Image: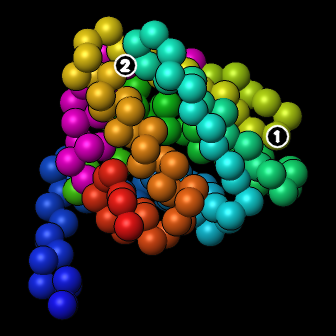
Amino acid sequence: MDFEKFKKEKVFQRGRGGSDPQHLEDERLFHALLEHHDEIERSTKKIEGGIESVTRVVSRDTELVKILQEHAVGMKKRFDGGRAIRSWDPLFTQLFDERDQIKMRWEMLEDGIKVTLRGEDTKIQELIDLHDETLHAFIDYGFRAAKEESPYRP
């Protein structure tokens, strides 16, 4: 069966991409992580109201650790500033629409980053869980997952 005929056209809900220096830098970092996804591992623990995740660079590549940490900080800045990413992906559009209800904290680790995401509403907690599932897919499948809507399930 030809599944290509079922593929949805990407519809950008919050503008398409960007060419400003910060957007290009964020994209460069994200692409580097996707390219080296096999050197990264992520674990998630459910906590009250959300999740605690630890993402580590198992290859111990210090440059990749720096990229991972810069990416997380950059995404938090985008999130806080309402500068949407993946605006063709309904999950990310919803996350940005609900961003005021999501609390994020991070702690830099020698080989990665620990991030806590929480929300008080069960709908927000479900979004957090789907986002977490999507990040796991990015790490498991790299660019293959990044080309698809979230959550990606091969």
Q: Nearer the viewer, residue 40 or 44?
A: 44
The residue tagged with tag 2: helix, strand or loop?
Answer: loop
Relative height, residue 5 to residue 134 (above, below): below
Query: Which quadrant, please, contains the C terminus?
Result: bottom left
- The amino acid marked with disc number 2 is Ile
Under circle 1, the secondary element is loop
* Residue that appears at 80% across and 51% down: 58
In terms of image quadrants, where is residue 50? Answer: top left
Would you name the residue on which mark 1 appears?
111
Q: Main secondary structure of the magenta part?
A: helix
Dot placed on the residue nearer the N-terminal end, 2 or 1: 2
Residue 80 in picture, x, y percent from top left: 40, 25
The N terminus sits in image quarter: bottom left
Place of residue 11 in the rendered image (x, y in percent of width and height, measured from the top left): 14, 61
Which residue extends farthest bottom? 1
Distance Cα–Cα, label 2 vs label 1 = 25 Å
Other residues around mark 1 within 10 Å, as few (<14) / some (14–19) / many (≥20): many
In the rendered view, tell whether residue 105 sits above or below residue 81. above
Residue 59 is situated, as x and y percent measured from the top left of the image, at 84, 57
First to last magenta residue range:
89-105
Q: Position of residue 28 (x, y in %)?
A: 57, 61
- Residue 61, quarter of picture: bottom right
Identify which residue is drawn at 43% across, 64% down: 145
Residue occupying image coordinates x 26% and y 43%: 91
Q: Which mark is residue 102?
A: 2
